[in-house]
Image (cartoon, rainbow, N blue to C red):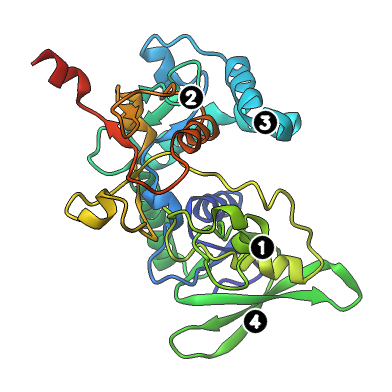
């Protein structure tokens, strides 16, 4: 294992990016994840990465500005907007896209306008893989190669669950490392160093003591598009050790999911699946429309997710049958 490491907990896109950036800045890194395969929910992302004033936009003749991206994000965040954080996100968005292109040679040559955006700025590649899969797999492959060639610099510990933080006995606001368990050998160990928590969310935890049940009991029965690893471990550990959770009730409800059309019970509303595959906004960005049970449009499909989801809830007050998304409407109408 690398010595004097920065400890990254979580192997999704945030954790992989943090690990790479720490390595590139000269630090040693230990990355821990409870899964046997890394990528988190990021690997399932189907849209791409947003960036304003990127080289790709310029090459495609897209007239966008950082301020437009800032204003779009500010409007989407509504009363929870944090202008300082939104400025960091939007003003550094092009650099993030360029980092992926330059450091990892990723193809992000296609740009689309999706919900909540006033300009095309969602970048993805021509690869058949989902954009999230293409990005996370490339970062993972590169990090694994570095761990193999430079084991004194990088260690990746899979099937390894962090269960507590190591707190300085003289200062309970100072974290010295983490305690973790090897899920295969059941051995409990410790590693010391600065800690970056990148453990994802908690919207796949439906247990009695879940954060979702505590903070958003009104949506506990909705299907989740999260992987079953998203159980709020990181939040629970941090809050147990004097950390403070914020906005834990701000759980995003995505408007569209994909139902297996061989599952007639789900189609006719006789049951509600526990998990669904995400019906990406890219489908609506390419012209898909959303219809109620009477075959009528009832919302702007390119609106923000909370708006579209809210209009759906107004349209159906019970699980009568799925609201339909029609993705070849114009072709059928013309034929």
Residue bearing the label numbered 4 = 190
Q: Nearer the viewer, residue 118 or 316?
A: 316
- Select label 3 or label 4 by which is in front: 3
Is label 4 in a helix, a strand or a loop? strand
- Select label 4 or label 1 by which is in front: 1
Q: How many marks?
A: 4
Residue at (43, 86) in percent of width and height: 184
- Select label 4 or label 2 by which is in front: 2
Q: Quadrant of residue 239?
A: bottom right
Residue at (59, 57) in percent of width and height: 198
Q: CA distance from mark 4 to mark 2?
A: 47 Å
Give yes or no for contact between labels 4 and 2 (Cβ–Cβ under 8 Å): no
Left or right of residue 263, residue 119 in this image = right
Q: Which mark is residue 86?
A: 3
Residue 229 screen position, x and y as percent: 47, 66
Residue at (15, 16) in percent of width and height: 333
Residue bearing the label numbered 1 = 214
Q: Residues within 10 Å of mark 4 (few under 14, many from 20)?
A: few
Q: Residues within 10 Å of mark 3 (few under 14, many from 20)?
A: some
Residue lying furthest right: 170
Which of pointers 2 and 3 lies earlier in the amino acid sequence?
A: 3
Which quadrant of the figure contains the N terminus? bottom right
Residue bearing the label numbered 2 = 303
Q: CA distance from mark 2 to mark 3?
A: 19 Å
Is label 3 in a helix, a strand or a loop? helix
Q: From the viewer's perspective, is residue 191 above or below residue 258?
A: below
């Amino acid at each position: 294992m690398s010595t004097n490491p920065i400890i990254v907990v979580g192997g999704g896109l945030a954790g992989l990016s943090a690990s790479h950036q720490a390595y590139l800045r000269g630090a040693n890194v230990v990355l821990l994840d409870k899964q046997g395969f890394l990528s988190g929910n990021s690997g399932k992302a189907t849209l791409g990465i947003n960036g304003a004033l990127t080289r790709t936009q310029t090459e495609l003749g897209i007239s966008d500005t950082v301020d437009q991206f800032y204003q779009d994000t500010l409007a989407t965040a509504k009363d929870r907007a944090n202008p300082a954080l939104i400025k960091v996100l939007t003003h550094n968005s092009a650099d993030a896209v360029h980092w992926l292109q330059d450091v990892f040679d990723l193809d992000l040559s296609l740009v689309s306008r999706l919900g909540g955006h006033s300009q095309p700025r969602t970048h993805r590649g021509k690869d058949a893989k989902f954009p999230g899969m293409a990005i996370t797999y490339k970062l993972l492959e590169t990090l694994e190669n570095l761990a193999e060639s430079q084991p004194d610099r990088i260690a990746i510990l899979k099937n390894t669950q962090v269960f507590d933080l190591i707190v300085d006995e003289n200062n309970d606001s100072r974290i010295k490392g983490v305690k973790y368990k090897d899920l295969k050998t059941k051995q409990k160990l410790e590693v010391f160093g600065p800690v970056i928590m990148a453990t994802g969310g908690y919207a796949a935890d439906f247990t009695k003591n879940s954060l979702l049940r505590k903070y958003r009991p009104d949506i506990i029965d909705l299907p989740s598009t999260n992987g079953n690893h998203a159980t709020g471990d990181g939040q629970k550990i941090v809050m147990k050790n004097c950390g403070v959770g914020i906005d834990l009730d701000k759980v995003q409800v995505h408007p569209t999911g994909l139902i297996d059309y061989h599952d007639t019970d789900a189609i006719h509303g006789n049951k509600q699946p526990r998990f669904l595959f995400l019906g990406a906004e890219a489908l609506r960005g390419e012209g898909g429309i959303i219809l109620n049970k009477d075959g009528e449009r009832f919302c702007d499909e390119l609106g923000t997710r909370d708006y579209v989801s809210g209009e759906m809830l107004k349209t159906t007050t019970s699980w009568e049958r799925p609201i339909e998304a029609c993705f070849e409407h114009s072709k059928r109408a013309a034929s």
